Amino acid sequence: MKKNKGKSGDADEKEFVFEFRAGKHNCVLKVPLKFPVHENVSDLHGRLMLLHKIPCYIENELKTSLSNFIESETILDYDREAELALQKLTTGDVDVNQLTNAWTRSYMETTLEHARPEEPSWDEDFADVYHELIHSPASETLLNLEHNYFVSISELISERDMEIKKLLERQAAEMKKVMHELGNTLCDQDVNTVAAQHFKARQVLESKWTSELKQVTCIQKQEYQEWVVKLHQDLQKSNNSSKINEEIKVQPSQLSEPTDSGSRMFEEQPQLEESFTIHLGAQLKTMHNLRLVRADVLNFCKHRRHGSGGEKLRRLQTALSLYSSSLCGLVLLVDNRVTSYSGIKRDFAIVAKECTDFHFPCLEEQLEEVQQVVLYARAQRSSKQKEQPGQEIPKNGGDEKNKNVERNPSNILPGEFYISRHSNLSEVHAVFHLCVDDNVRLGNITARDPAIMGLRNILKVCCTHDITTITIPLLLVHDMSDSVCSRQWSHSVQAENRTRAFTESQPKSRPNHG
C-alpha cells in the first residue's frame, strides 16, 4: 500500500501504524485510511479487532490510538486547506468581494437574528383581523353581511335554474314535434341537427351563468375583505369605541327566526340522534364523544336561506372556530378522479357554490391544485422506480388499479385522500375526499382494506392539525339502501352463528366435588 508522505496536500489516503506487544513478540498493525474519515470510530475499531484478531487486552489502547490519529490528521488537513486558501487570497486568485458576499449570505441564512423577516401576506393579515372581529360585538354584523351575500347568490342560482328549466321544457316540446314529423317530412339527420342545436344552446346558457356567478362571487369576496379591514381600522382609530360597539349591537339581524305563519314550512325537522361517551387507551385513557345521527351528509354543509335560531348559532360557532384549535371535518367517499362532475362530488360542489368563500380559494381552484400535486407525486414515484428497478414500491389495490393509474396519472388510488378547506359551509371547515372502490360499496371490506387504512390516516391528520370534530359516514356508505342493510344483517348473523358454533364445540366443565 502506498504511504502518505505527510506534506502532500493532494493525498487522501494515510497509513495508521500501531505497535503492540503480544507475549514475547513485537507486532505492528498498518492500516490505510482514507481522509476525511466518514465512518464511526467505534465501528472501525471493532472491525480492526475482528479482522486482525487483536488480543482483547489491547482493545482500549488501540481505540485511543486510532481516535487520536484520526483527530490529529483531520486537523492537519484542515490547516493545510486553510493555508492554501490564504495563499490564493494573497496572490489574488480569489475575488475578495465575491468571497465576502458568500460569507455574508451564508451567515444571514444560518443565523436567525440576522435573517430577513418574513413579509406578512394578505391572507394572514385578513385572518388575524377577522379572528379579532368575530370575537367582538361586530360578529353579528359580519354574519348579517355574509347572509346578505348568501341570499343574493341564492337568488341568482334560482334565476339560473328557472331559465335552464324553461329552456329544457322548450327544447323538449321542439324535440317532440320533430319526432312526430320523423319519417314524414323529417329524417334522422334533421333530428341529430336539432339535438346538436339544443345541446349547444344549453352549453351557452350554462357558460353564461357560470361566468356571471364567478364574477359576482369575486366581487363579493373583494368587497367583504375590504369592508372587514376598514371596520377593523375604524374600531382601532376610534376614540369612542364603545359607541361604535353599541351601534353594531342594535343593527337588525337578518338571521332572526321568522314569525309569520307562512314560514313554518322552513322549520327544521327533528332528527334522530344518540350520543355516547367512550374511553380509549390502555394506561392513559382519553375520553371521546360519539354522536350517531340519521341525516344526509351534505346537511352539515348546507346553509338555509330562511334561517332559524339554530341556524344562526351554527353559523356563529363555525365562524368563531374558523381560526382556532377546534376545527370540524367531514369525510366524503369519492371515486378516483379529482373532479366534481358526478355523484356525491357534484352535489357537494353545488352546495359549495351556494355561498361565497371569503377566506379560501373556491373548490375548483383547490381541485386544480390537488391535480397538480397528484401528477407531481406520480412523477416522483415513477422516477424512483426507474432509479431502483429491483425494489418495488408498494401500492394500494390490485394490479388492475395500478394499470389504471398508469394510464391516468391524475387519478388517485383507493385509500388515498385529498383535503379541501372551506369557510362557507354550515358546520364544516375541512373536507376529506377519501377514494374508495367497489369493495366498500358492496360491503366486501376487511380490516386491511385501503379504505380503512385511509380512514386511519385521516384520523392521524385530524390529531396533528387541530381537527377535534369529524363526521364519518356510518358503515362507509352514504346511502343506506336495502341491499346494504341486508348484507350487514347477513354478516352479523354469520358472526353470531360462528360464535355459537365455537361455544358449543368447547368441552363442558366438570363439577368439582373436592
Image (spheres, rainbow, N blue to C red):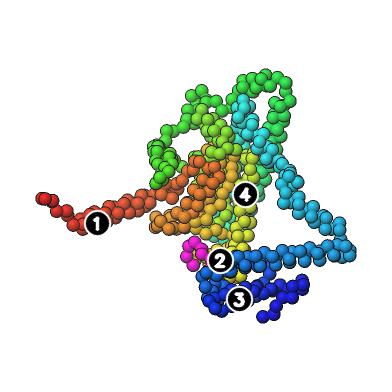
Residue 68: % across, % down: 65, 65
CA–CA distance in space, label 3 to label 2:
15 Å
Residue 19: % across, % down: 61, 74
The disc, 2 or 1, on the residue closer to the chain's N-terminal end is: 2
Residue nearest the observer in this picture, 434 or 302: 434
- Span highlighted in magenta in the image: 392-399
Residue 141: % across, % down: 63, 27
Q: Is residue 82 above or below residue 503?
A: below
Going by the numbered disc 3, the residue's amino acid type is Leu
Kindly identify which residue carries mark 4.
366
CA–CA distance in space, label 4 to label 1:
52 Å
Q: Is residue 335 visible?
A: no
In this rendering, position of residue 210 left or right of residue 269: right
How many numbered circles does the render carry? 4
Kindly identify which residue carries mark 2.
60
Q: Residue furthest front?
A: 24
Kindly identify which residue carries mark 1.
502
* Identity of the residue drawn at 63% across and 65% down: 67
CA–CA distance in space, label 3 to label 1:
70 Å
Going by the numbered disc 2, the residue's amino acid type is Asn
Foreground disc of the pair 3, 4? 3
Q: Quadrant of residue 226?
A: top right
Helix or strand or loop: what does disc 3 sit on? strand
Kindly identify which residue carries mark 3.
29
Helix or strand or loop: what does disc 2 sit on? helix
* Identity of the residue drawn at 32% across and 54% down: 491
* Identity of the residue drawn at 24% across and 56% down: 502
Foreground disc of the pair 3, 1? 3
